[in-house]
């Protein structure tokens, strides 16, 4: 029988439902992503701080774009990834998908906070204010509250098998706001400028900034991937320890 | 349909006969609105400007604080298990409970809001838009709140968590409701905001009971 593409993807996703296989594959992937992330990060920061000339109007403060834009992009990307994981967990009861969303949440929350803080630091010299209630800033702040709620919901249940689907439902409800955070600058024309990088679109960032920015973007993404893998692996090990303890207690 | 209205009547009777029913929600709303002049000072001009927003915040908190009545008691004493087994779909049960919740909290607020608006010195032009925005917006507060209440219904101390989960979801309703009041207060047309509020409530009507019922089934598992 020929497989449809969807069935093929499902099949592949399911092969990672076996925690043993996930542990084996992630054990090979982790050192690679961690190494590339470190190299890109060091080169990107060096470029940003020493090679890049000061910006014509903003001076040195524009360098913060190399942290702000990747953090903001990842804050939304991580939430989208949590939503996909939650869908897998809810519909197909994929056992690693639960852990994947749980492991991603604190990292995503940290990126959101980083985007908000670097934005405020950048906003003070350029906009003249630390904070405005502009559509982008506000939706990003609400996204941060969704991360907090998601983490709090996981912690509130004693029983992990109940916490996982409840958190997944909440994550999907919050996806409305993640979409809002992504498109807020296009929907409302307030203080925050439109996206800096778009695929196939017009460039809003000068060439000199473009390459280091892409480098930092890749570094942040690979950093997320590495931390996420470490966290999922830790969760799987924690589950094993719990199972062994329970088995020992029963004897 | 008969079962739906029986559900609504049961919840209304329970709300009215135990713990003051709708009166407590309204009492909270009134006290919260009275706190505003203490907080920002009794300057009539300032109060008039912020009145629509403050009334909306007070209404939103009153709706949120009464959410624990939605499912908690029924989950604890086991009635919810029977309701889940009944031929009435759980989604419809949830909708009936939301309607009862709105009738005991949202509807009394519509009556109390003009009185509090007087004490806050709200401009006369804003009254119609303010009441209309509350009438269109508060049903969505009950329905969105049902999601948070359902997610935390199995917990012992779900109160603060419900607030953390639900308040971010209330933001669009709050923004549009306050915008409608402010627009009318400054002599502008409030109808776009009222239409958007209506759109939110209509979108909540099919979606929220689905999500809340899914969350309730988890609590009952």
Image (cartoon, coloured by chain):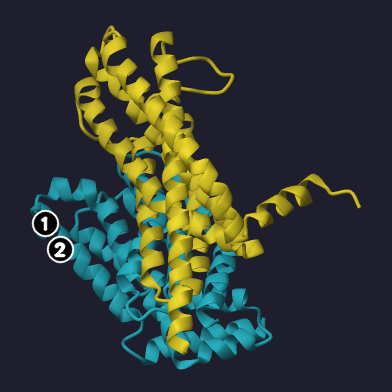
How far apart are the two marked residues, 2 and 1, measured between alpha carbons? 6 Å
* Crowd band around label 1 with a 10 angstrom C-alpha radius: few (<14), some (14–19), many (20+): few
Whether residue A235 appears in this view of the structure is: yes
Most foreground residue, A202 or B197: A202
Residue A21 locus on image (x, y percent):
61, 55
Specify the subunit that label 1 lies on: B
Specify the subunit that label 2 lies on: B
Q: Secondary structure at mark 2?
A: helix
The disc placed on residue B39 is: 1
Whether residue B140 appears in this view of the structure is: no
Most foreground residue, A189 or B5: A189
Query: Which chain appears yellow?
Result: A
Residue A99 to residue A130: above or below: below
Residue at the location (50% across, 66% down)? A164
Residue A3 locus on image (x, y percent):
84, 49
Instruction: Please tell me the colour of chain B.
Output: cyan
The disc placed on residue B35 is: 2
Residue A36 locus on image (x, y percent):
45, 30
Residue B48 to residue A129: above or below: below
Residue at the location (22% across, 30% down)? A121
Residue B142 locus on image (x, y percent):
45, 68
Quarter location, residue B88: bottom right
Quarter location, residue A159: bottom left
Residue at the location (47% across, 68% down)? A239
């Amino acid at each position: 029988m020929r497989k449809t593409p969807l069935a093929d993807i499902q099949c592949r996703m399911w092969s990672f439902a076996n925690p043993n296989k996930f542990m084996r594959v992630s054990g090979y992937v982790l050192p690679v992503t961690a190494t590339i992330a470190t190299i890109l990060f060091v080169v990107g920061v060096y470029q940003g701080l020493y090679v890049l000339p000061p910006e014509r109007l903003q001076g040195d403060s524009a360098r913060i774009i190399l942290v702000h834009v990747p953090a903001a992009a990842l804050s939304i990307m991580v939430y989208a990834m949590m939503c996909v994981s939650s869908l897998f967990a809810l519909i197909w009861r994929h056992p690693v998908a639960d852990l994947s969303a749980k492991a991603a949440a604190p990292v995503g929350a940290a990126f959101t906070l980083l985007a908000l803080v670097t934005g405020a630091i950048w906003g003070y010299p350029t906009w003249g204010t630390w904070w405005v209630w502009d559509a982008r800033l506000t939706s990003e702040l609400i996204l941060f509250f969704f991360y907090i709620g998601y983490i709090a919901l996981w912690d509130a249940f004693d029983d992990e098998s109940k916490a996982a689907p409840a958190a997944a439902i909440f994550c999907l409800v919050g996806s409305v706001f993640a979409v809002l955070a992504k498109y807020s600058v296009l929907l409302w024309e307030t203080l925050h400028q439109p996206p800096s990088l778009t695929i196939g679109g017009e460039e809003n960032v000068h060439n000199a900034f473009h390459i280091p920015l892409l480098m930092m973007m890749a570094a942040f993404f690979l950093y997320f991937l590495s931390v996420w893998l470490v966290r999922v692996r830790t969760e799987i090990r924690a589950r094993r320890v719990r199972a062994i303890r329970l088995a020992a207690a029963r004897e | 349909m008969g079962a739906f209205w029986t559900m609504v009547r049961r919840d209304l009777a329970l709300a009215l006969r135990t713990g003051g029913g709708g009166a407590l929600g309204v009492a909270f709303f009134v006290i919260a609105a009275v706190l505003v002049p203490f907080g920002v000072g009794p300057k009539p001009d300032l109060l008039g400007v912020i009145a629509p927003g403050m009334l909306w915040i007070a209404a939103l908190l009153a709706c949120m604080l009464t959410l624990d009545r939605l499912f908690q008691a029924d989950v604890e004493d086991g009635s919810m298990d029977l309701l889940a087994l009944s031929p009435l779909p759980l989604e419809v049960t949830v909708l009936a409970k939301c309607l009862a919740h709105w009738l005991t909290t949202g509807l009394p607020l519509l009556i109390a809001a003009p009185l509090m608006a007087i004490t806050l010195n709200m401009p006369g032009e804003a009254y119609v838009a303010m009441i209309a925005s509350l009438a269109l917006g508060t049903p969505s507060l009950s329905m969105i709140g049902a999601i948070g209440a359902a997610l935390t219904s199995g917990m012992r101390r779900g109160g603060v968590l419900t607030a953390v989960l639900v308040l971010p979801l209330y933001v669009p309703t709050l923004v549009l409701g306050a915008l409608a009041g402010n627009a009318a207060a400054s002599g502008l047309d409030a109808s776009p905001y009222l239409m958007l509020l209506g759109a939110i409530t209509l979108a909540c009507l099919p979606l929220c009971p689905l999500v809340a019922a899914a969350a309730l089934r988890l609590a009952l598992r």
